[in-house]
């Protein structure tokens, strides 16, 4: 089958022919890929950022955000059957450790086990994952249309869920980054909270998308974005800042935008957070890191999507056009989420 | 009356004679001081740290942690009467703004209004405060014995209360700094949670006090404290780190001591918090600043003290010995909390 | 001035001339009434239901849901001034007890202190209340338009706030009673949660109002309402039932409508709740009583109204038409809330 | 093998010889029983109470509270191996439904699936259960010593966990019923909260056990227990009532013992809860049903036991003495928990 393979860090991956994955253990599930989302994490994997955190042998098939149809299952898989439309939670978890039993799939004692990051992923015709990482979709849903929920969506939802208790009537929430995650996060905020949403992005096109998704105000990140948020909040600041970028600049901005007692939810990564403890203490600020989300989050998000409260904006590319997709991403030309779809198509 | 007055930043305050405070508005309360605690914040005030945050005209009477007896009240003060033993919440709040109505006394729209920091404080025979800042004590309690609860105690309790939901059976909590706040925090943790407490301090005497307060383990901060916490937690780390120091060193240590999903509660201040967003995100860490506490916190803490679940270790000094007290504090010779008591004594 | 006075339990109150209330204590506030809402509680007061719970001497001016303009203030009232548009929280609280300091205005140690129930109320040209019971309105707001928020609104909001944590995406909430409280509750649910709202009422006109307020489905209470809710929820039941009626019938219905782990929020009263402990235990049901709400709730609700997320449907009556208003209420002819407005009008 | 079998409702079960259970599916686990607790639920099963809720074919092996050693496992069981000491969560759950994924094992979409209630249970030499229902024990623990944690313990802990947020310093909690569940609940309360514990029981011996477990006060249920609780709480009542009995009498008592805003946690069952909605609403009371607990609860409780914070008082009977055990239970002669232990002993 075809797959997008990384052979050397910091060099372009290649589309090539590889062997199909096979069932070898009771919990294995092989999924025929309907669509697999592309994001900055793929760039970070390509560039070797995770090599130290979770060492992995190259070559590696990329793609950690996948939906499709069940192609084959192990003997212990009972909740889905061959042919079912499914979406894949990005982490393979054991189901037996304390974290898993409490619904904390990302804190499984076995650590990160991500197709596309630590083992072969979804930029391929077939991907092998595991029982607990496979959630059934409504059969009327086209997998490629929701693939972006598997990682971008669940990450945004997970952070929004932590924002909800801090967002009462009259509260303000700033969303930094109105891209793949942000445009879903804004829709979740509209559906789940009474808060006023202010979107911040460097790109005016992204801000237009933010407005279509329900943002009440937008602020172009042109150097005056902190002032602009202050103006829009009557000088007070926002109760919550959701940062889908996480670079040095956005971290600095976030502290300038928060009310005392405010909550800063960090989803994007790349920069360094720096703040005097005096500021942290006097302001009683809360800073919360967010790593993907749980299967429970993904199920809730699918219900939002099923009710029409969340819609993903996707840009589809055939698998072979991986190079174009990655260059559009790097040039900031993607609105919403880029999704790679193998041309072999529907999951028979 | 006598008072400890600061005339010039970064120079020693002096004990001198000043006019007694008088009632001028309906909510005013003048308290005859039974005891007033001394802490690093007094050093920071002396050294001008707060001058930028909350500008104030010198000279200023220091002392922000006070208990005593009601000496005079304004026309609208109904919940205490002259002669009542009382403890003073350190912040004067309006009672009418949204924050006050929700019980968030520290976020009063009028901002910080602290006797001893922004107006004349409790290192004096009398201190003027306001209705909402005065809580009645059990008449059998000696004010000097509980003065340290007014700021050190309530700050420790406030942070512990935020730790409680994260401390289930089998959890571990590290307390960095076993001094004025820390030794109260450890007792609150013992009374309120099933967690195992690990105390960390540079001073072996402080660690002895920590053990007497209920710490299960101690680790001297000799450079190997992170490793030691790792050993004591079977390599996993602690669910919560409570940092009563907040310097660069302790911030760095804290991140080395936390489990994934762990909560870092910062109470002390002075250093700078620096952490890559990748580490924050992958670890799903939470960082929470803590500023003093609410009147509700102080009332709860008084109930703990009344039930014998919390006892303050105090070192008493007469007002005139302010210089000795401050030099003992700076040399690390105080166990628990230093408290200044005017010699005129009991509040008749 | 004119006032609606109750002289004998279970007999009609009369509109008559009484002396104007005057300031006698530092916290007193006299409000010129712009509008005062009428509801079933007024019927219960008339019929002596509260006489045992909170004994009171007759005659009594009715009216516990009031908005208007400040007419006079005591010496300790600082947060509002004569002429300000205000809304009155229905309970007068002390501000100094543990409950008040934690923002729990309804649990004030001084007990219920309700104009219109335990002392002279708002069906009059002027009403005397107290500092903490008076919240400033945006000066552009007409008090009669928001009077119904003072009790109906805050009671509905308070219950909805307790529903929020149980209402995730895909959840269902049943609102029993789409009248004065219910039509506000439905709007709060729409603004604050992603849940699907099912309104139940005996009156088809009330169900139309429910739909205008955002209910996704309606069920006429014709004896088949439990079945209907089961059908609408795919047999599962609803995560939350909000009961604004609280009679024997609605209690019985509620238990038939809940999922395992469901939450039953009771706001209306009149009937008796009866359930076998086996059913309660096997279903892990939660039953929660709701009494009015806090000043914090009222402030939040005003922000929702200010943002246009909540609008009150009111039927205005002049004070003299009190008899008509009460008979419309008893005959089920009021949509939304009946509000009495003294003809002397705007608060100069 | 030997097993205690129920052939006819309302007649005594008999100890008889039956075939050993065998592995037939990938998730099956057969456990060699070390000990299995006996409680009033066994009487209710014998008497047919559950026959309507969950129909089951007789004969049935009783016993729903089991610990022992793994005897055999299916092909998909990876987290325990033959010979491991284990404790059995009483419900067999699917692991794939929304409830299971969120850690709500008792709300599994497959419904109640309880060995000893809906299928053959643990009063036998071997019991067949399923992968997710088996938690590994510390190998140094004797299974019979902790068997009572599998149902009595986890039920008590689950309810206590819901009590924790309502139990601040100075709070009071009443525990009704100081038997198998109650004596564990009291120890959990002592370890996890700062609250004052008041135990209520009809039996003076049970109250002695309650004191040994950490109760601060006791009240014999002699008709004056409500008054006694009022006295012990200065007239105010308790913030929480934990009812491990759930009969008509204890329900009535509970409402007499609660403060406004109090929480009534119902664990025992048998009676009917009856309360006017006016009382529920004015008092803002919360009533919460509790059904067993989650695997996460059981794991947390095992950590409490491992740390010596909870110890089970058990009365051991050989399997053949089932009749004696049941008659001791019915006559109120058991202190703590009766546990049946097959004589074949340690799990080799």
Image (cartoon, coloured by chain):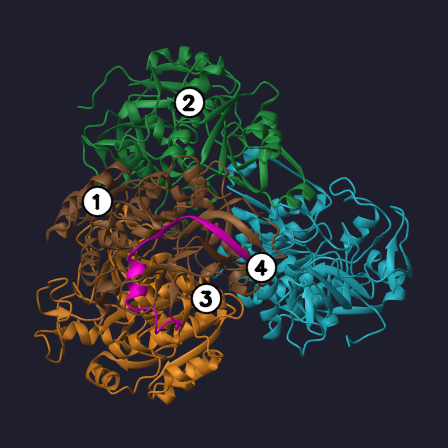
Chain colours: A orange, B brown, C cyan, D green
Q: Name the foreground residue: B256 vs D217.
A: D217
Q: Nearer the viewer, mark 1 or mark 3?
A: 1
Residue at screen point 65% across, 54% down: C292
Q: Nearer the viewer, mark 1 or mark 2?
A: 1
Residue furthest front in the image? B17
Q: Earlier in the sequence, mark 4 or mark 1?
A: 4
Classify residue A314 as left or right of residue A10: right
Q: Nearer the viewer, mark 4 or mark 2?
A: 4
For label 4, the SS is loop
**Chain of residue at mark 2:** D
Classify residue A95 as left or right of residue B225: right
> Which mark, by number, is residue B27?
4
For label 1, the SS is helix
Query: In 3D space, how far apart are the residues under numbered discs 4 and 3 (Cα atoms)?
Result: 52 Å
Q: Nearer the viewer, mark 3 or mark 2?
A: 2
Whether residue C11 is visible: yes
Disc 2 residue crowd, few under 14, some 14–19, many 20+, Cα 10 Å: some
Where on the picture, by quarter, is residue A331? bottom left
Q: Position of residue D14 (x, y in %)?
A: 41, 14
Q: Looking at the picture, does residue C213 appear above or below residue D144?
A: below
Residue assigned mark 2: D211
Magenta residues span: B29-58
Q: Are marks 4 and 3 in contact (CB under 8 Å)?
A: no
Residue at screen point 28% across, 86% down: A332
> Which mark, by number, is residue A304?
3
């Amino acid at each position: 089958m075809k797959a997008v393979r990384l052979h050397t860090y910091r060099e372009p991956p290649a589309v090539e022919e590889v062997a199909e994955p096979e069932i070898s253990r009771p919990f294995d599930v092989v999924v025929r890929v309907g669509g697999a989302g592309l994001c900055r994490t793929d760039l970070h994997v390509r560039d070797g950022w995770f090599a130290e955190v979770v060492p992995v042998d190259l070559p590696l098939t990329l793609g950690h955000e996948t939906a499709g149809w069940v192609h084959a299952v192990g003997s212990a898989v009972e909740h889905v059957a061959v042919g079912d439309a499914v979406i894949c939670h990005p982490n393979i978890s054991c189901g037996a450790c304390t974290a898993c039993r409490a619904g904390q799939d990302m804190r499984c004692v076995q650590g990160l086990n991500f197709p596309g990051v630590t083992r072969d992923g979804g930029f391929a015709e077939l991907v092998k994952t595991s029982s607990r990482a496979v959630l059934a979709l409504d059969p009327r849903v086209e997998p490629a249309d929701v693939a972006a929920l598997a990682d971008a969506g669940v990450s945004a939802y997970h952070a929004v869920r932590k924002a909800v208790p801090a967002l009462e009537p009259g509260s303000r929430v700033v969303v930094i980054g109105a891209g793949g995650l942000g445009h879903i996060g804004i829709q979740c905020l509209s559906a789940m909270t009474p808060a006023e949403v202010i979107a911040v992005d460097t790109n005016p096109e992204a801000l237009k998308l933010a407005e279509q998704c329900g943002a009440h105000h937008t602020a172009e990140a042109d150097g005056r974005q902190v002032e602009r948020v202050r103006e829009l909040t009557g000088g007070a600041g926002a109760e919550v800042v959701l940062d889908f970028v996480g670079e040095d600049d956005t971290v600095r901005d976030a502290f300038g935008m928060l009310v005392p007692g405010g909550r800063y939810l960090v989803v994007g990564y790349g920069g360094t957070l720096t703040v005097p403890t005096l500021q942290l203490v006097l302001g009683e600020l809360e800073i919360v890191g967010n790593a993907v989300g749980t299967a429970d989050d993904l199920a809730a998000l699918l219900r939002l999507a099923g009710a029409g409260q969340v819609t993903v904006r996707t840009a589809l590319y055939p698998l072979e056009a991986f190079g174009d997709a990655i260059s559009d991403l790097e040039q900031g030309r993607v609105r919403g989420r880029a999704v790679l779809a193998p041309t072999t198509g529907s999951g028979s």
